[in-house]
Amino acid sequence: MRDEKLLKLIKISLLSVMAFLLMYIEIPLPIFPDFLKIDVSDLPALLGAFALGPVAGVIIELFKNILHGMLAGKTAFVGELANFLVGGCLVYVAGYVYKMRKSKNGAIVALLMGTVVMSIFAGILNSYVILPLYEKVLGFPVTVVVKMGTAINPKIVDLNSFILWSIIPFNLLKGLVVSAVTLALYKRVSPLLHKEHMNMKYKNKNQNL
């Protein structure tokens, strides 16, 4: 049991480092303000959530953002807080649903549910917590954020419309991208994530014979 927990911790640590490194690969999209960029750093956390459980996925998100805040953060941990809460929402919901139904269709449903819940949560979080924190901690006014959105989409005229036309669509798109990559990779990497666990169970079973 102790060895099994140690192996799980090692996997979580490795996936956290991978997720941290992936945070450096960002793709800007012309349909969103400059500070909203697509990345796939939630991918290792989703793989971990599917293989090791939803709590493990959230821990990977936490470690990833602690590392980023300490080594590369420029937002006084406000950006990392947002990334952790939003990414943790996606990972936990998807991981929990997949745990209840471990199949390809179950994975698709889990990722879609996680994406939708995450997008709604991101809208609420940005409206009441994250954007006000940016304004208070970093002196980045919400009005400036709204203007950045208006310059791209004239339908954006205030904070609520910014959430509706920028934050929620961005997170929907990001969730779909990460989900597609997860579906493409999970079957290939799943044996690696489970290999030591299966060997340990086999070893313990033989010892009990």
Image: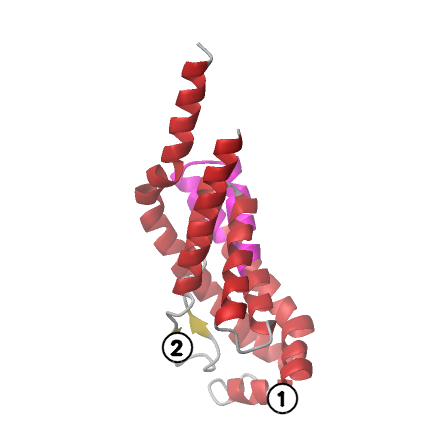
Alpha carbon distance from label 2 to label 1: 21 Å
Residue 28 is labelled as 2
Q: Is mark 2 on a helix, strand or loop?
A: strand
The answer to whether any part of residue 176 appears in the image is: yes
Position in image of residue 29 (x %, y %)? 39, 77
Is residue 60 part of the magenta span, yes or no?
no
Q: Which of 17 and 92 is in front in this view?
A: 17
Looking at numbered disc 2 in the image, what kind of residue is underneath it? Answer: Pro
Q: Residue at x 48, y 64 (%)?
A: 172
> What x and y, as percent, mark residue 110?
49, 46
Q: Do the residues labelled 2 and 1 touch (CB within 8 Å)?
A: no
Residue 109 in view in this figure: no
Could you tell whether 145 is left or right of 103 in the image?
right
- Marks 2 and 1, the one that precedes in the sequence: 2
Amino acid identity at mark 1 = Thr
Whether 163 is drawn above or below 59: the answer is: below
Q: Residue 105 carries which label?
A: none
Q: Mark 1 points at which residue?
A: 143
Question: Which residue is located at x 66 percent, y 83 percent?
Answer: 135
Q: What stretch is highlighted in magenta?
A: 87-112
- In the image, 159 versus 74, the foreground residue is 74
* Camera-nearest residue between 41 and 118: 41
Q: Quadrant of the C terminus?
A: top left
**Label 1: which secondary element:** helix
**Residue pushed farthest top?**
209
Q: Magenta stretch: dominant SS? A: helix
* Residue occupying image coordinates x 53% and y 57%: 63
The spot of residue 108 in percent (x, y) is 42, 47
